Amino acid sequence: MSITDSPPRAGTRTARRRRSSDRGFNRGFRWIAVGAGVLILVVLAAVALFLLWQAWPALTAGGDELAAEVPRFPADTSFLGYVGPLVFGTLLAAVLALCLAVPVAIGIALFISHYSPRRLSQVLGYLVDLLAAIPSVVYGLWGFLVLAPVLTPFWLWLNENLSWIPLYGGQASTTGRAMATVGVVLAVMILPIITAVSREVFLQTPKLHEEAALALGATRWEVVRTAVLPFGRSGVISAAMLGLGRALGETMAVLMIISPGFSYSLDILAAGQHQTIAAYIAADFPESTGLGINTLIAAGLVLFVITLAVNMTARWIVARRKEFSGAN
Amino acid sequence: MAQRIEVKDLNIYYGDFLAVQDVAMTIEPKSVTALIGPSGCGKSTYLRTLNRMHEVIPGARVEGKVELEGVDLYGSDVDPVAVRRNVGMVFQRPNPFPTMSIRDNVLAGVKLNNKRISKPDADDLVESSLRGANLWNEVKDRLERPGSGLSGGQQQRLCIARAIAVKPQVLLMDEPCSALDPISTLAIEDLIGELKSEYTIVIVTHNMQQAARVSDRTAFFNIAGTGKPGKLIEMDDTSTIFSSPAEKSTEDYVSGRFG
């Protein structure tokens, strides 16, 4: 760049040497950039191929064969009938977590970006980031030992008084080791990432748009509603999808809290109803061999596909209203 | 519906820094008042005190009085939100809400404060506001398209339509043409000439020909040096300011000898 812009000095040795080393850097940087991009594709393809290759025996085996070799495989069903409840449990846990976490995260992000005094907002920002630094096994311990007992009376109350709502029906667990508790723990775990990304997006709202709203006589909430939230909409969706991705794949916390089961039940307060794919793989892997391992890997493949589909849906949602976004 | 603004002993601060000192000024209704002066002299800052937009900057504050038909805008029982509904503003760079359609942009101010408006009323308001901003014929077939898809000059007129849709008494314009090409500028200047029959208009401009073309009265602001407060040097009929101003510095500025 600098070479082409500067007046021609060809002929002097320094200029020629600088030009050649500059070109070297240019080319080197270009290859590093291209290489990094290709590496991502290679890793993704390698993982997908590994999953397909290892899952293939389980995908092609008959139900009877699987039932004979795989522990906890129900009789008279195919692979799909077996993985179905796991997919259901995974999605239920992730959606519960997302429903709980997104409104709270948007609230915290808005408070930090537009309401709190500057000093408080910095402290709050650090605290939220700290939540992200807690290992998931610690969340699992905390959920099992602390949160579950605390929440149980509340779950029992919901079950007693609001059981006409499908989610709160069934026989509520007296230990709190049910999907509802998992949802709460997962919500806490994905809160930091959603909050952090939303906060950054809200802070980037152009001053011009906020002032436009203010000059029309908007209150602080109306500025948020007319300028900040519409501008941050696609960013918040991306943030939620990042959180959803983490919730879908979360293993340790779910494994430690939930009392597993294989059903399509919506009773999130009941024990022994649900299991997620990731937690199921972790739980059964140590005692599996042969076709059992292939079955677990096939379940992993399903999770991979779900996560991919979620991400692509999110991108599609964001792209659909591109011309109304703040980008142009 | 236009109203008179009376400014008395106004001092404008950013924190401890005195940005504009001792302004006293009467702005007549149904006229265009231009604020001119070199960069940094505080004319934009002063303009923003007329609808209490100055105070949204952290640490910014004001001493003195700005009276709209005798009511002090900085009185303790005055809500800044109400002031801004009464005193509209158009900014230097066109700023339609990018996530809203043209129609929704015009209605944005009206829909604030949870006001409900029936669809026929809304349609009428959209049309009259866009006609008022000389934009109706250009956009009437694409009211549902995003406002950010218009040209710069059209966007600025959309912002003017949005500002007049809430039926303010006063319209403040902060260098409304500085980001526009000459043809769009001409369109906005024509529009200002039409709007002054209904509104009190105050316009900040760096373009002295523009001040001479559009305004009835002109106020010249100046600054003694960096770090010193800006001051109102003199205010008079525009023809007087540009032909025989009372102050030497005004004459130097309008004749292009500095600034």
Image: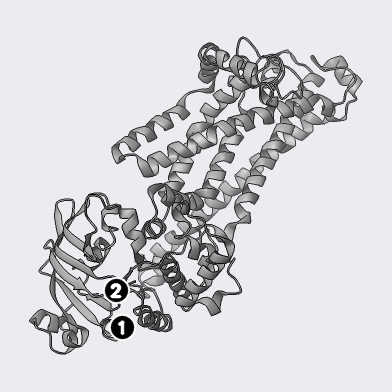
Q: Secondary structure at mark 1?
A: helix
From the image, tell me which residue sits under label 1. Answer: B214
Residue type pointed to by label 1: Val
> Which residue: 62% across, 14% down?
A177
Residue type pointed to by label 2: Ile
Answer with mark 2 or mark 1, whichever residue precedes in sequence: 2
Q: Secondary structure at mark 2?
A: strand
The chain holding disc 2 is: B
| Image location of residue A29, percent across then percent down | 49, 53
Q: Exactly how many numbered labels are in the figure? A: 2
Q: Are marks 2 and 1 in contact (CB under 8 Å)?
A: yes
Label 2 neighbour load within 10 Å: few <14, some 14-19, many 20+: many
Above or below: residue B132 compared with residue A317: below
The answer to whether residue B40 shows anywhere in this view is no
Spot the residue most to the top. A174
Q: Which mark is residue B203?
A: 2
User: What's the distance in space between the residues labelled 2 and 1, CA to CA?
Assistant: 9 Å
On the rendered structure, is B110 left or right of A251? left
The residue closer to the viewer here, B118 or B15, is B118
Colour scheme of this structure image?
Answer: one colour
